[in-house]
Amino acid sequence: MTTHLPEPLVIDAEFVDDEEPNPIPDEERGTERRPGRAATAAVFLARGTVRVVVRNIAATRTGLSVLVAERGAWLNGGKLSEAHLRTHLLNRRYAQWQSAQKTAAASLVEQAKVLQTQADTTTAQAMALQTQAATAVDRITKAASGTDPMKAGRQAGADRQAAAKLLEAAAEDRAAAGKLLAAAREIEQQLYLGHFEPNELELASHRRRVANGRRWRTAALCLVVGFAELQIGPLLMEITAAGVLTAAWAKGRFTGWRSADPEIEALKYQPDTGKSTVAAGQSADAPAAPGPDPAQPGATHNAASPGPANAPADEQHAPADADEPDEEIVLLNAALTAAGLLPPARRGKLPLGVQVIDAPDYSIGNGFVTTVDLPVGGGKLVRHALAKADVIAGELSVPVTQLAIREVPAAEGGHGRRMQVWVADEDPYLAVGHDQSPLVLAATWNFWGGVPFGKTILAERRSLLTQFAGGFTSMFFSGMMRFGKSFAMRVAVAAALLDPGLRLYLANGKQGADWKSAKKVAHRFTEGTGEEDLARFEAMLDELVEDMEQRYRDFGDLDVSLVPEGRLTPKLARHHGMPILLAVIDELQLYLLAMTPKRRARALEKLKNLLRGGPAAGVFLICGSQRPDGEEVPTGFRDLFGVRVSVRCPDKRSSRMCLGDLASDNGADSSVLTEDHVGITVVAVGHRWEILSTDFLTSAEFDEICERARAMRERDGTLTGDAVGDVRITEPTGIRAVRACVDALRELDTDRATIALLAAQIGGQDEEPDEDNPNASPGEFAGITPDVLRKLLKDAGCGNTVSLGAVEDQRNASGYKLSTFEGVLRAAKAARDSH
């Protein structure tokens, strides 16, 4: 029987090969090594895709070239248009500003929460103390056994006081927390004012920044895919290759599926486009000046509006509802940034600017004035701006005399960061002129209330203070010759003369006509630096010191109601025979240069004694000097004056000597004044300073004021001393020797000395000659011997020498004690007063 086998099945060779691909060896056909169905299907599909791509090889090659080109363009940012870059950059800046604002607000809120928690804890402690006090009182009321009523009552009172202090501290913490929350709300409500158009350089830089970011992201993705392929095996590599080839085939087959320019996203805020942000004088390619960061409180705008609120100026420079800062504010921000008062704009950061309180106002007729706040958090105050006034003026392209910066006082709503800035078109100190002094027409003047002195460049009147904290403060005038120093001093002296409760002591180191008129009203008057003039000058200082010390002794005998806090009052000065003692010393350096170093030191010590102890006793000094260097007028002496006034100085070093370190460190500099600024003064009180146009007072007007002052005192019976011919009787030589010995003991810081040491001290035997001033006078006792001095002291009433004990390396030395000398001087003063 013949068996017929079936014919072989024919399968399309296009899809299935005759032989089974990659036959699996028999030894590997175990179940555990057989691939799963999913893997087999994936491999089958991948291989099928490869076959399809092979048939479309031309399209695939074209697509691969397109992919390579698009990849390069994407990595380099070449497909990004300038419009897209601009929007992306502006949105990035805005997002950074928002992030910074949120961070700052969150920090303030966190601080407020800490304070509130602290306040709650403190309140709980206070409530516990109050409960404890109430319990103690209840126990006392119920007379509980074992309770000491006195002790429990004291404890209850202490608990209540402690609770009150804790509640007060809690209230302060809550108030501080409220301020922090208010500041946080203010930050959250601030409008974005940092919009300015990027230039070509900024756009190119941003394109590089975007491209670098893409490269880093691509490299990271390649690392992840490569690591995954190493872990998973060839399957993922085949799938990746299939995907790339499929994309390439699609790119080559369908030409419409190519990358297009990215769509331009919308700005996240609406900037004002009505005015260019490039300031006048800047090129369009230059980086924009830093703009203000906080919103302008004076501008009218919707707090919810996303855009910034700035005020561009119209023809009248009036602020309007707009979104860009005025050009003046932009330039001011740039100047403050250059001066280091605002942080420079950093890459990717928004520049900080001032907060405009009052927009630039040109109605003053000479430039513009504006009020601004320095930004919070920068640590910069108005005093720092004053110290950099010369830099700010230079950046604003004006002389420093055409820039006026004033710290707004607290009474006008100011604080340490609020300042008024005036940038003038012409020199305001020359434009404002000089006013006639109101003292010319004043019948009397209250010297306690200050001295009318001059006006600012805004024509605001200013007075020189005469009192600090209830006591007098003295004035120091200095500067170059021929710029009005003595004239300025005469304004202050004229105000003093019109107060009948004042006694004038005047010494002028330079003989001349400046002070001749005051001789008719001065209690003591001396001029020149001859030996007799120096003796009269020293006698005037001695008289002032004696009167000051006697006044303090008299205070102890008066009713407490007449001497509040141990100080002189206007009532005492005018009705109890204790007038203000005003000592005016012009050209002080001439007196000091005419003395030998030791004699000069004694005179300076007396002046310092008057400056330190005189204010409460009613002693007031007005001193004038030219260039007060450390040798002629020492720094320690100048620093005792509360008010410093300087006319023009030749350099900054001289200005610092005249105005002091505090004011100079805050920008005070009288060397900026020019030769045209006659009668213009820099007035410094501590670290605060101001430039003033001094009132004008002619010599004839000053003479007329002196006549009125004399008539006033004659009427009141208060004209005394040299003015009525009651010249101080020249003290006997012995009394002057006693006074010199007192000064010597104080210099030696001892209360006793031998006659030999006293003679050497007052005679200047151990003093080196002054090479700089060979004609300096050592005084009348130069070269005195111990025997001559012993005779003078005995004739003055000091008696014989007494035992001093162990002094000057002697076991039982003899000499004189300070108490003996002081007793003799008191007796001499009593005899002089009775005469």
Image (tube, rainbow, N blue to C red):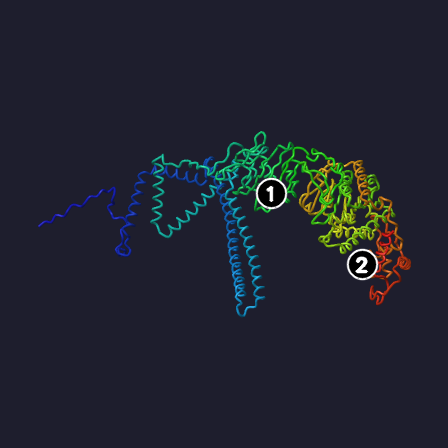
Label 1, secondary structure: give it: loop
Question: Which residue is drawn at the image coordinates 75% and 36% (left, top)?
Answer: 441
Residue 601 appearing in the image: no
Most foreground residue, 226 or 707: 707
Residue 602 position, x and y percent, is: 81, 53
Q: Seen from this angle, which residue lies furthest front?
A: 142
Q: Closer to the N terminus: mark 1 or mark 2?
A: 1
Label 1 neighbourhood size at 10 Å, few (<14), some (14-19), many (20+)? few
Residue type at numbered disc 2 = Leu
Residue 748 marker: 2
- Left or right: residue 75 versus residue 718 is left
When asked about the image quadrant of residue 453, the answer is top right
Q: Which residue is mark 1?
A: 413
- Left or right: residue 1 versus residue 398 is left
Label 2, secondary structure: give it: helix
Residue 242 position, x and y percent, is: 34, 44
